Each structure stands twice: as C-alpha cells, then as structure tokens.
Image (spheres, rainbow, N blue to C red):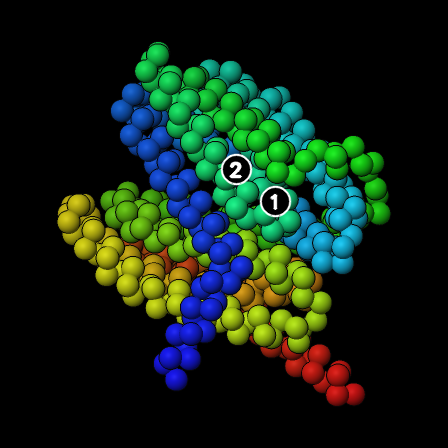
Amino acid sequence: MMRNILEKGFAIGRSTTARHIYWVFSGNVLSTVLTFFALVVVMAPRISKAEYGIFLALFTLANLLSDLSEAGLGGALTKFIPPLLLQKKASRAKEFLATAHQIELGITIVVCVTLLLLAGPLARILFAGTAQINVVITALMTATMILMGFMVFALSAYKKFPEVTVVNVFYSIIRLALLLVFALLTKLSLFNILIVYLLSSILSWIYSLFFLGTSWVTIPFSRERAGKIIRFASFLAVQKVFVAVSSRLDLLMMVPLAGAVEAGIYGMASRFALVYPLLISSLAQVLAPKFAELATIGAATAFFKKVGLVICGLLVSLIVFNSFARIFISAFVQNYSEAIPVLGGLLLSMAPFIAATPFVSFVVYTLKKPWIMMVASFVQLVVIFAVNWWLLPSLGRFAPATGIGLGNLTIFIIAAGASWYYFNQEKYENRH
C-alpha cells in the first residue's frame, strides 16, 4: 500500500500541473528574496527612516490599488480562455483577452487620473507632507503595475507559467539592479527610488508583451463580450475587496487593541507564516485554468483525487516547517522568542486554507459560481473582525491566529459544502 502511495506521489510530482506549480512557486520565492534585498539591504541603510516609511506607505498604496484594480478580470480570463483554447478557438480567446484589456485600461486611466488630481491633498494628509511629485510618480507607477499585473494574469490564463515566472523575476532583478546603480552613482532618495520602481514596472510590462504578442491589441471592443466578462468578474472584484481587507485586519487592529509590542511579536511570526499564502497562491494560480477546462462536475472528480495528494503533502509540511522555523527564530532572532508559539498557531490556522484551495477553484471555474466565494469571503471578513475585536484585548498576539483559523475554516466549509451539494445534484439529475 505504501509503495502504491509513493508511486502515485512521484507520478503527480512529475505531472505537468506539478511542474507548473514548481515554476510559479520558485518564481515567487526568488522574487520575494530579491525584494528583501532591495528593501532591507540596499534601500533601508541609505535613506532616513522617515523617507523609508513614506516610501513603504506610497508603495503599499500602489500595491493595494493595483490589486483592487484587477477587478476580477484575471479570474474572467481564466474562466473564458482555457476552454476556448481547448476547443481550438484561439481567435475567440484573443477577442476575450482584448476586451478584458480594454476594460482594464479604462480602470487604469480612472485610477491614475484620480490619484493625479488628488496628489496635493494626499501628500499633505496621508504622506507626512512629502513633495507632490512623489505622489504623481506613485500614480504613474500604480498605472503600470495594474497593466503589468493584467499581463501576468493573461499569461496564467494561457497556462504560460514559465513565462509568468520569468516576468515576475525580471521585474525584481531590474528593480534591484537599478537601485544598485543609483546607490553606486548617486545618493539614494525617495524621489529616485520611486523613479526606479516606475521604470522597473514599465520595462516588465513591455517585456511581458513579448510572450503574448500584440496582434490582439487592435481587436475592436465588443459590448457583448464585455457584458459576459463583467458579469463574471463583478463577483470576484467584490470578493477581492473583502479578501484585501480581511488579510490586513490583524496588524491594523492589534496596535490599538493590544499595543505595539504585541504587534511587533506577532509581526515577526506572521513574516515566517507568509510562505504558505505564497505557496497556496502559486497552487491556486495553476489549478484555476485546469478547473476552467473541466466542463462537468464528473470530469473534475478524477483531478480532485490527484490534487488531494498534494493537499495532504502540504498539510504534513506545516509540521516540518514549524520545526525549522522554531530553530531559525531561536538561533538568529532570539529577542523574538515569544513569536515561536504564535507561529505555531498561525501555521495551524493555515490548515483549512490549504484544504479549501481546490474547492475554491472548483466552485469558481468549474461550477462557474463566483458569487458563492464572494459570500464566503464576506462571512470570513465578519468572522475575523469579530474574533479580533473580542479576543485581542485579552489574548493579544495569540488572537489573530484564532480569527484567521476560524475565517479560513468558514471558507473551507462553504466551498467544500457547495462542491458536495452540486456534485450530488448532478448525480441525481443524471439518474433521472
């Protein structure tokens, strides 16, 4: 029996889906390492703490807006393009790509113009009176980040996962290289750091066009296609807002309710735990196009069995990772030893998140019912907020793990429950 399990495990490990996961995850890890060097090794020692704080605030704004401006269009591409490619309808796939890009371009213009018009007030109110030009550059950087993000989603929809990795790593390498050039040739400042980030995103966006080509750019806008895209994407867009808020509630609520020291200890543990959201997002990015290709619930059953073994492996890895992370914290950041039990709680809270991953992709892309996950994400947000509000004053740094765990459990129950319900419904309809 053990031999059969190992053989199945090795077979899955060599599969195309597994190779795609390796590509995306390794790219995400490498990009994270390069970003760490850019932010901590190159940038932080060369500018003042005030400039560093303002930069992080500006970049966080750009990241948040580019994330929200995706507006579910990446999910819509994944829903429409893989089935069309499977049916040998490449021209139709390009039409959906073009229409989604035109919608994204409209969103980009609105976001960029709004930031430009509000540059002065934003500089004074949110960014400690920084020069208005810094907010202007951030607005342009946000626009290019939105367009670059769209291209990454488009490459994923076409299942060009090695190309996704190359684009993401290229962006990180170019950014680090330009920072090093500026650091060697001149003094780093908030202004030229923002210029580096703007140039990096522009170059990466242009580079991504080499993999997708540009023939689809001139395809005329279609209201019919736009309607189909928006109807599907709207639920994912609302879901993204809920997820964006719930994923930031821990630290936002901890400082006022538990204090800065508790937030610092929790923040150290959460940095280590971030490896799992990174891994799971890589897995979900690869699973989404595959589930979109599956026309029926029955066809998805066999694929579920393969994915199930991967999920079991990830759940076991939580124990292994916790052991290594404890050793690392004890050896290198001894003054954060209080973070060790917090890390254990956070890793435990990831278990339902890992288990829910294939069910979420199945509900959204095979069942084509994104509204279910929109509702699930709203319930998750309410659960996390309520638990944090109730437990943070008494449990401090241990409270967010409870909230995240219960929130993730909510996602698992709703996604798995919906999958089970519609699976049984199809079986009943087939019998009759």
Disc number for residue 297: none
Q: Are marks 2 and 1 in contact (CB under 8 Å)?
A: yes
Residue 31 is situated, as x and y percent measured from the top left of the image, at 42, 40
Quadrant where the C terminus is found in the figure: bottom right
The residue nearer to you, when weighing 195 against 176, is: 176
- Taking the spot 51% from the left edge, 32% from the top edge, the residue there is 62
Q: CA distance from mark 2 to mark 1?
A: 10 Å
- Taking the spot 79% from the left edge, 48% from the top edge, the residue there is 92
Label 2: how many residues lie within 10 Å, few (<14), some (14-19) or many (20+)?
A: many
Residue 325 visible in the current orientation: yes
Query: Going by the image, does 27 lie left or right of 294?
Result: left
Mark toward the start of the polypeptide (2 vs 1):
1
Q: Which residue is mark 1?
A: 155
Image-quadrant location for residue 114: top right
Secondary-structure class at tag 2: helix
Residue 388 is situated, as x and y percent measured from the top left of the image, at 39, 56
Q: In the rendered view, tell whether residue 171 sits above or below residue 362.
A: above
- Taking the spot 58% from the left edge, 42% from the top edge, the residue there is 152
Label 1: how many residues lie within 10 Å, few (<14), some (14-19) or many (20+)?
A: many
Query: Going by the image, does 373 lie left or right of 232?
Result: left
Residue 384 is situated, as x and y percent measured from the top left of the image, at 45, 58
Q: In the rendered view, tell whether residue 327 sits above or below residue 310.
A: above
The residue nearer to you, when weighing 10 against 242, is: 10
Amino acid on which disc 1 is placed:
Leu
Residue 354 is situated, as x and y percent measured from the top left of the image, at 45, 64
Quadrant where the N terminus is found in the figure: bottom left
Query: Going by the image, does 311 lie left or right of 90?
Result: left
Q: Which residue is mark 2?
A: 167
Residue 402 visible in the current orientation: no
Q: In the rendered view, tell whether residue 183 sits above or below residue 220.
A: above
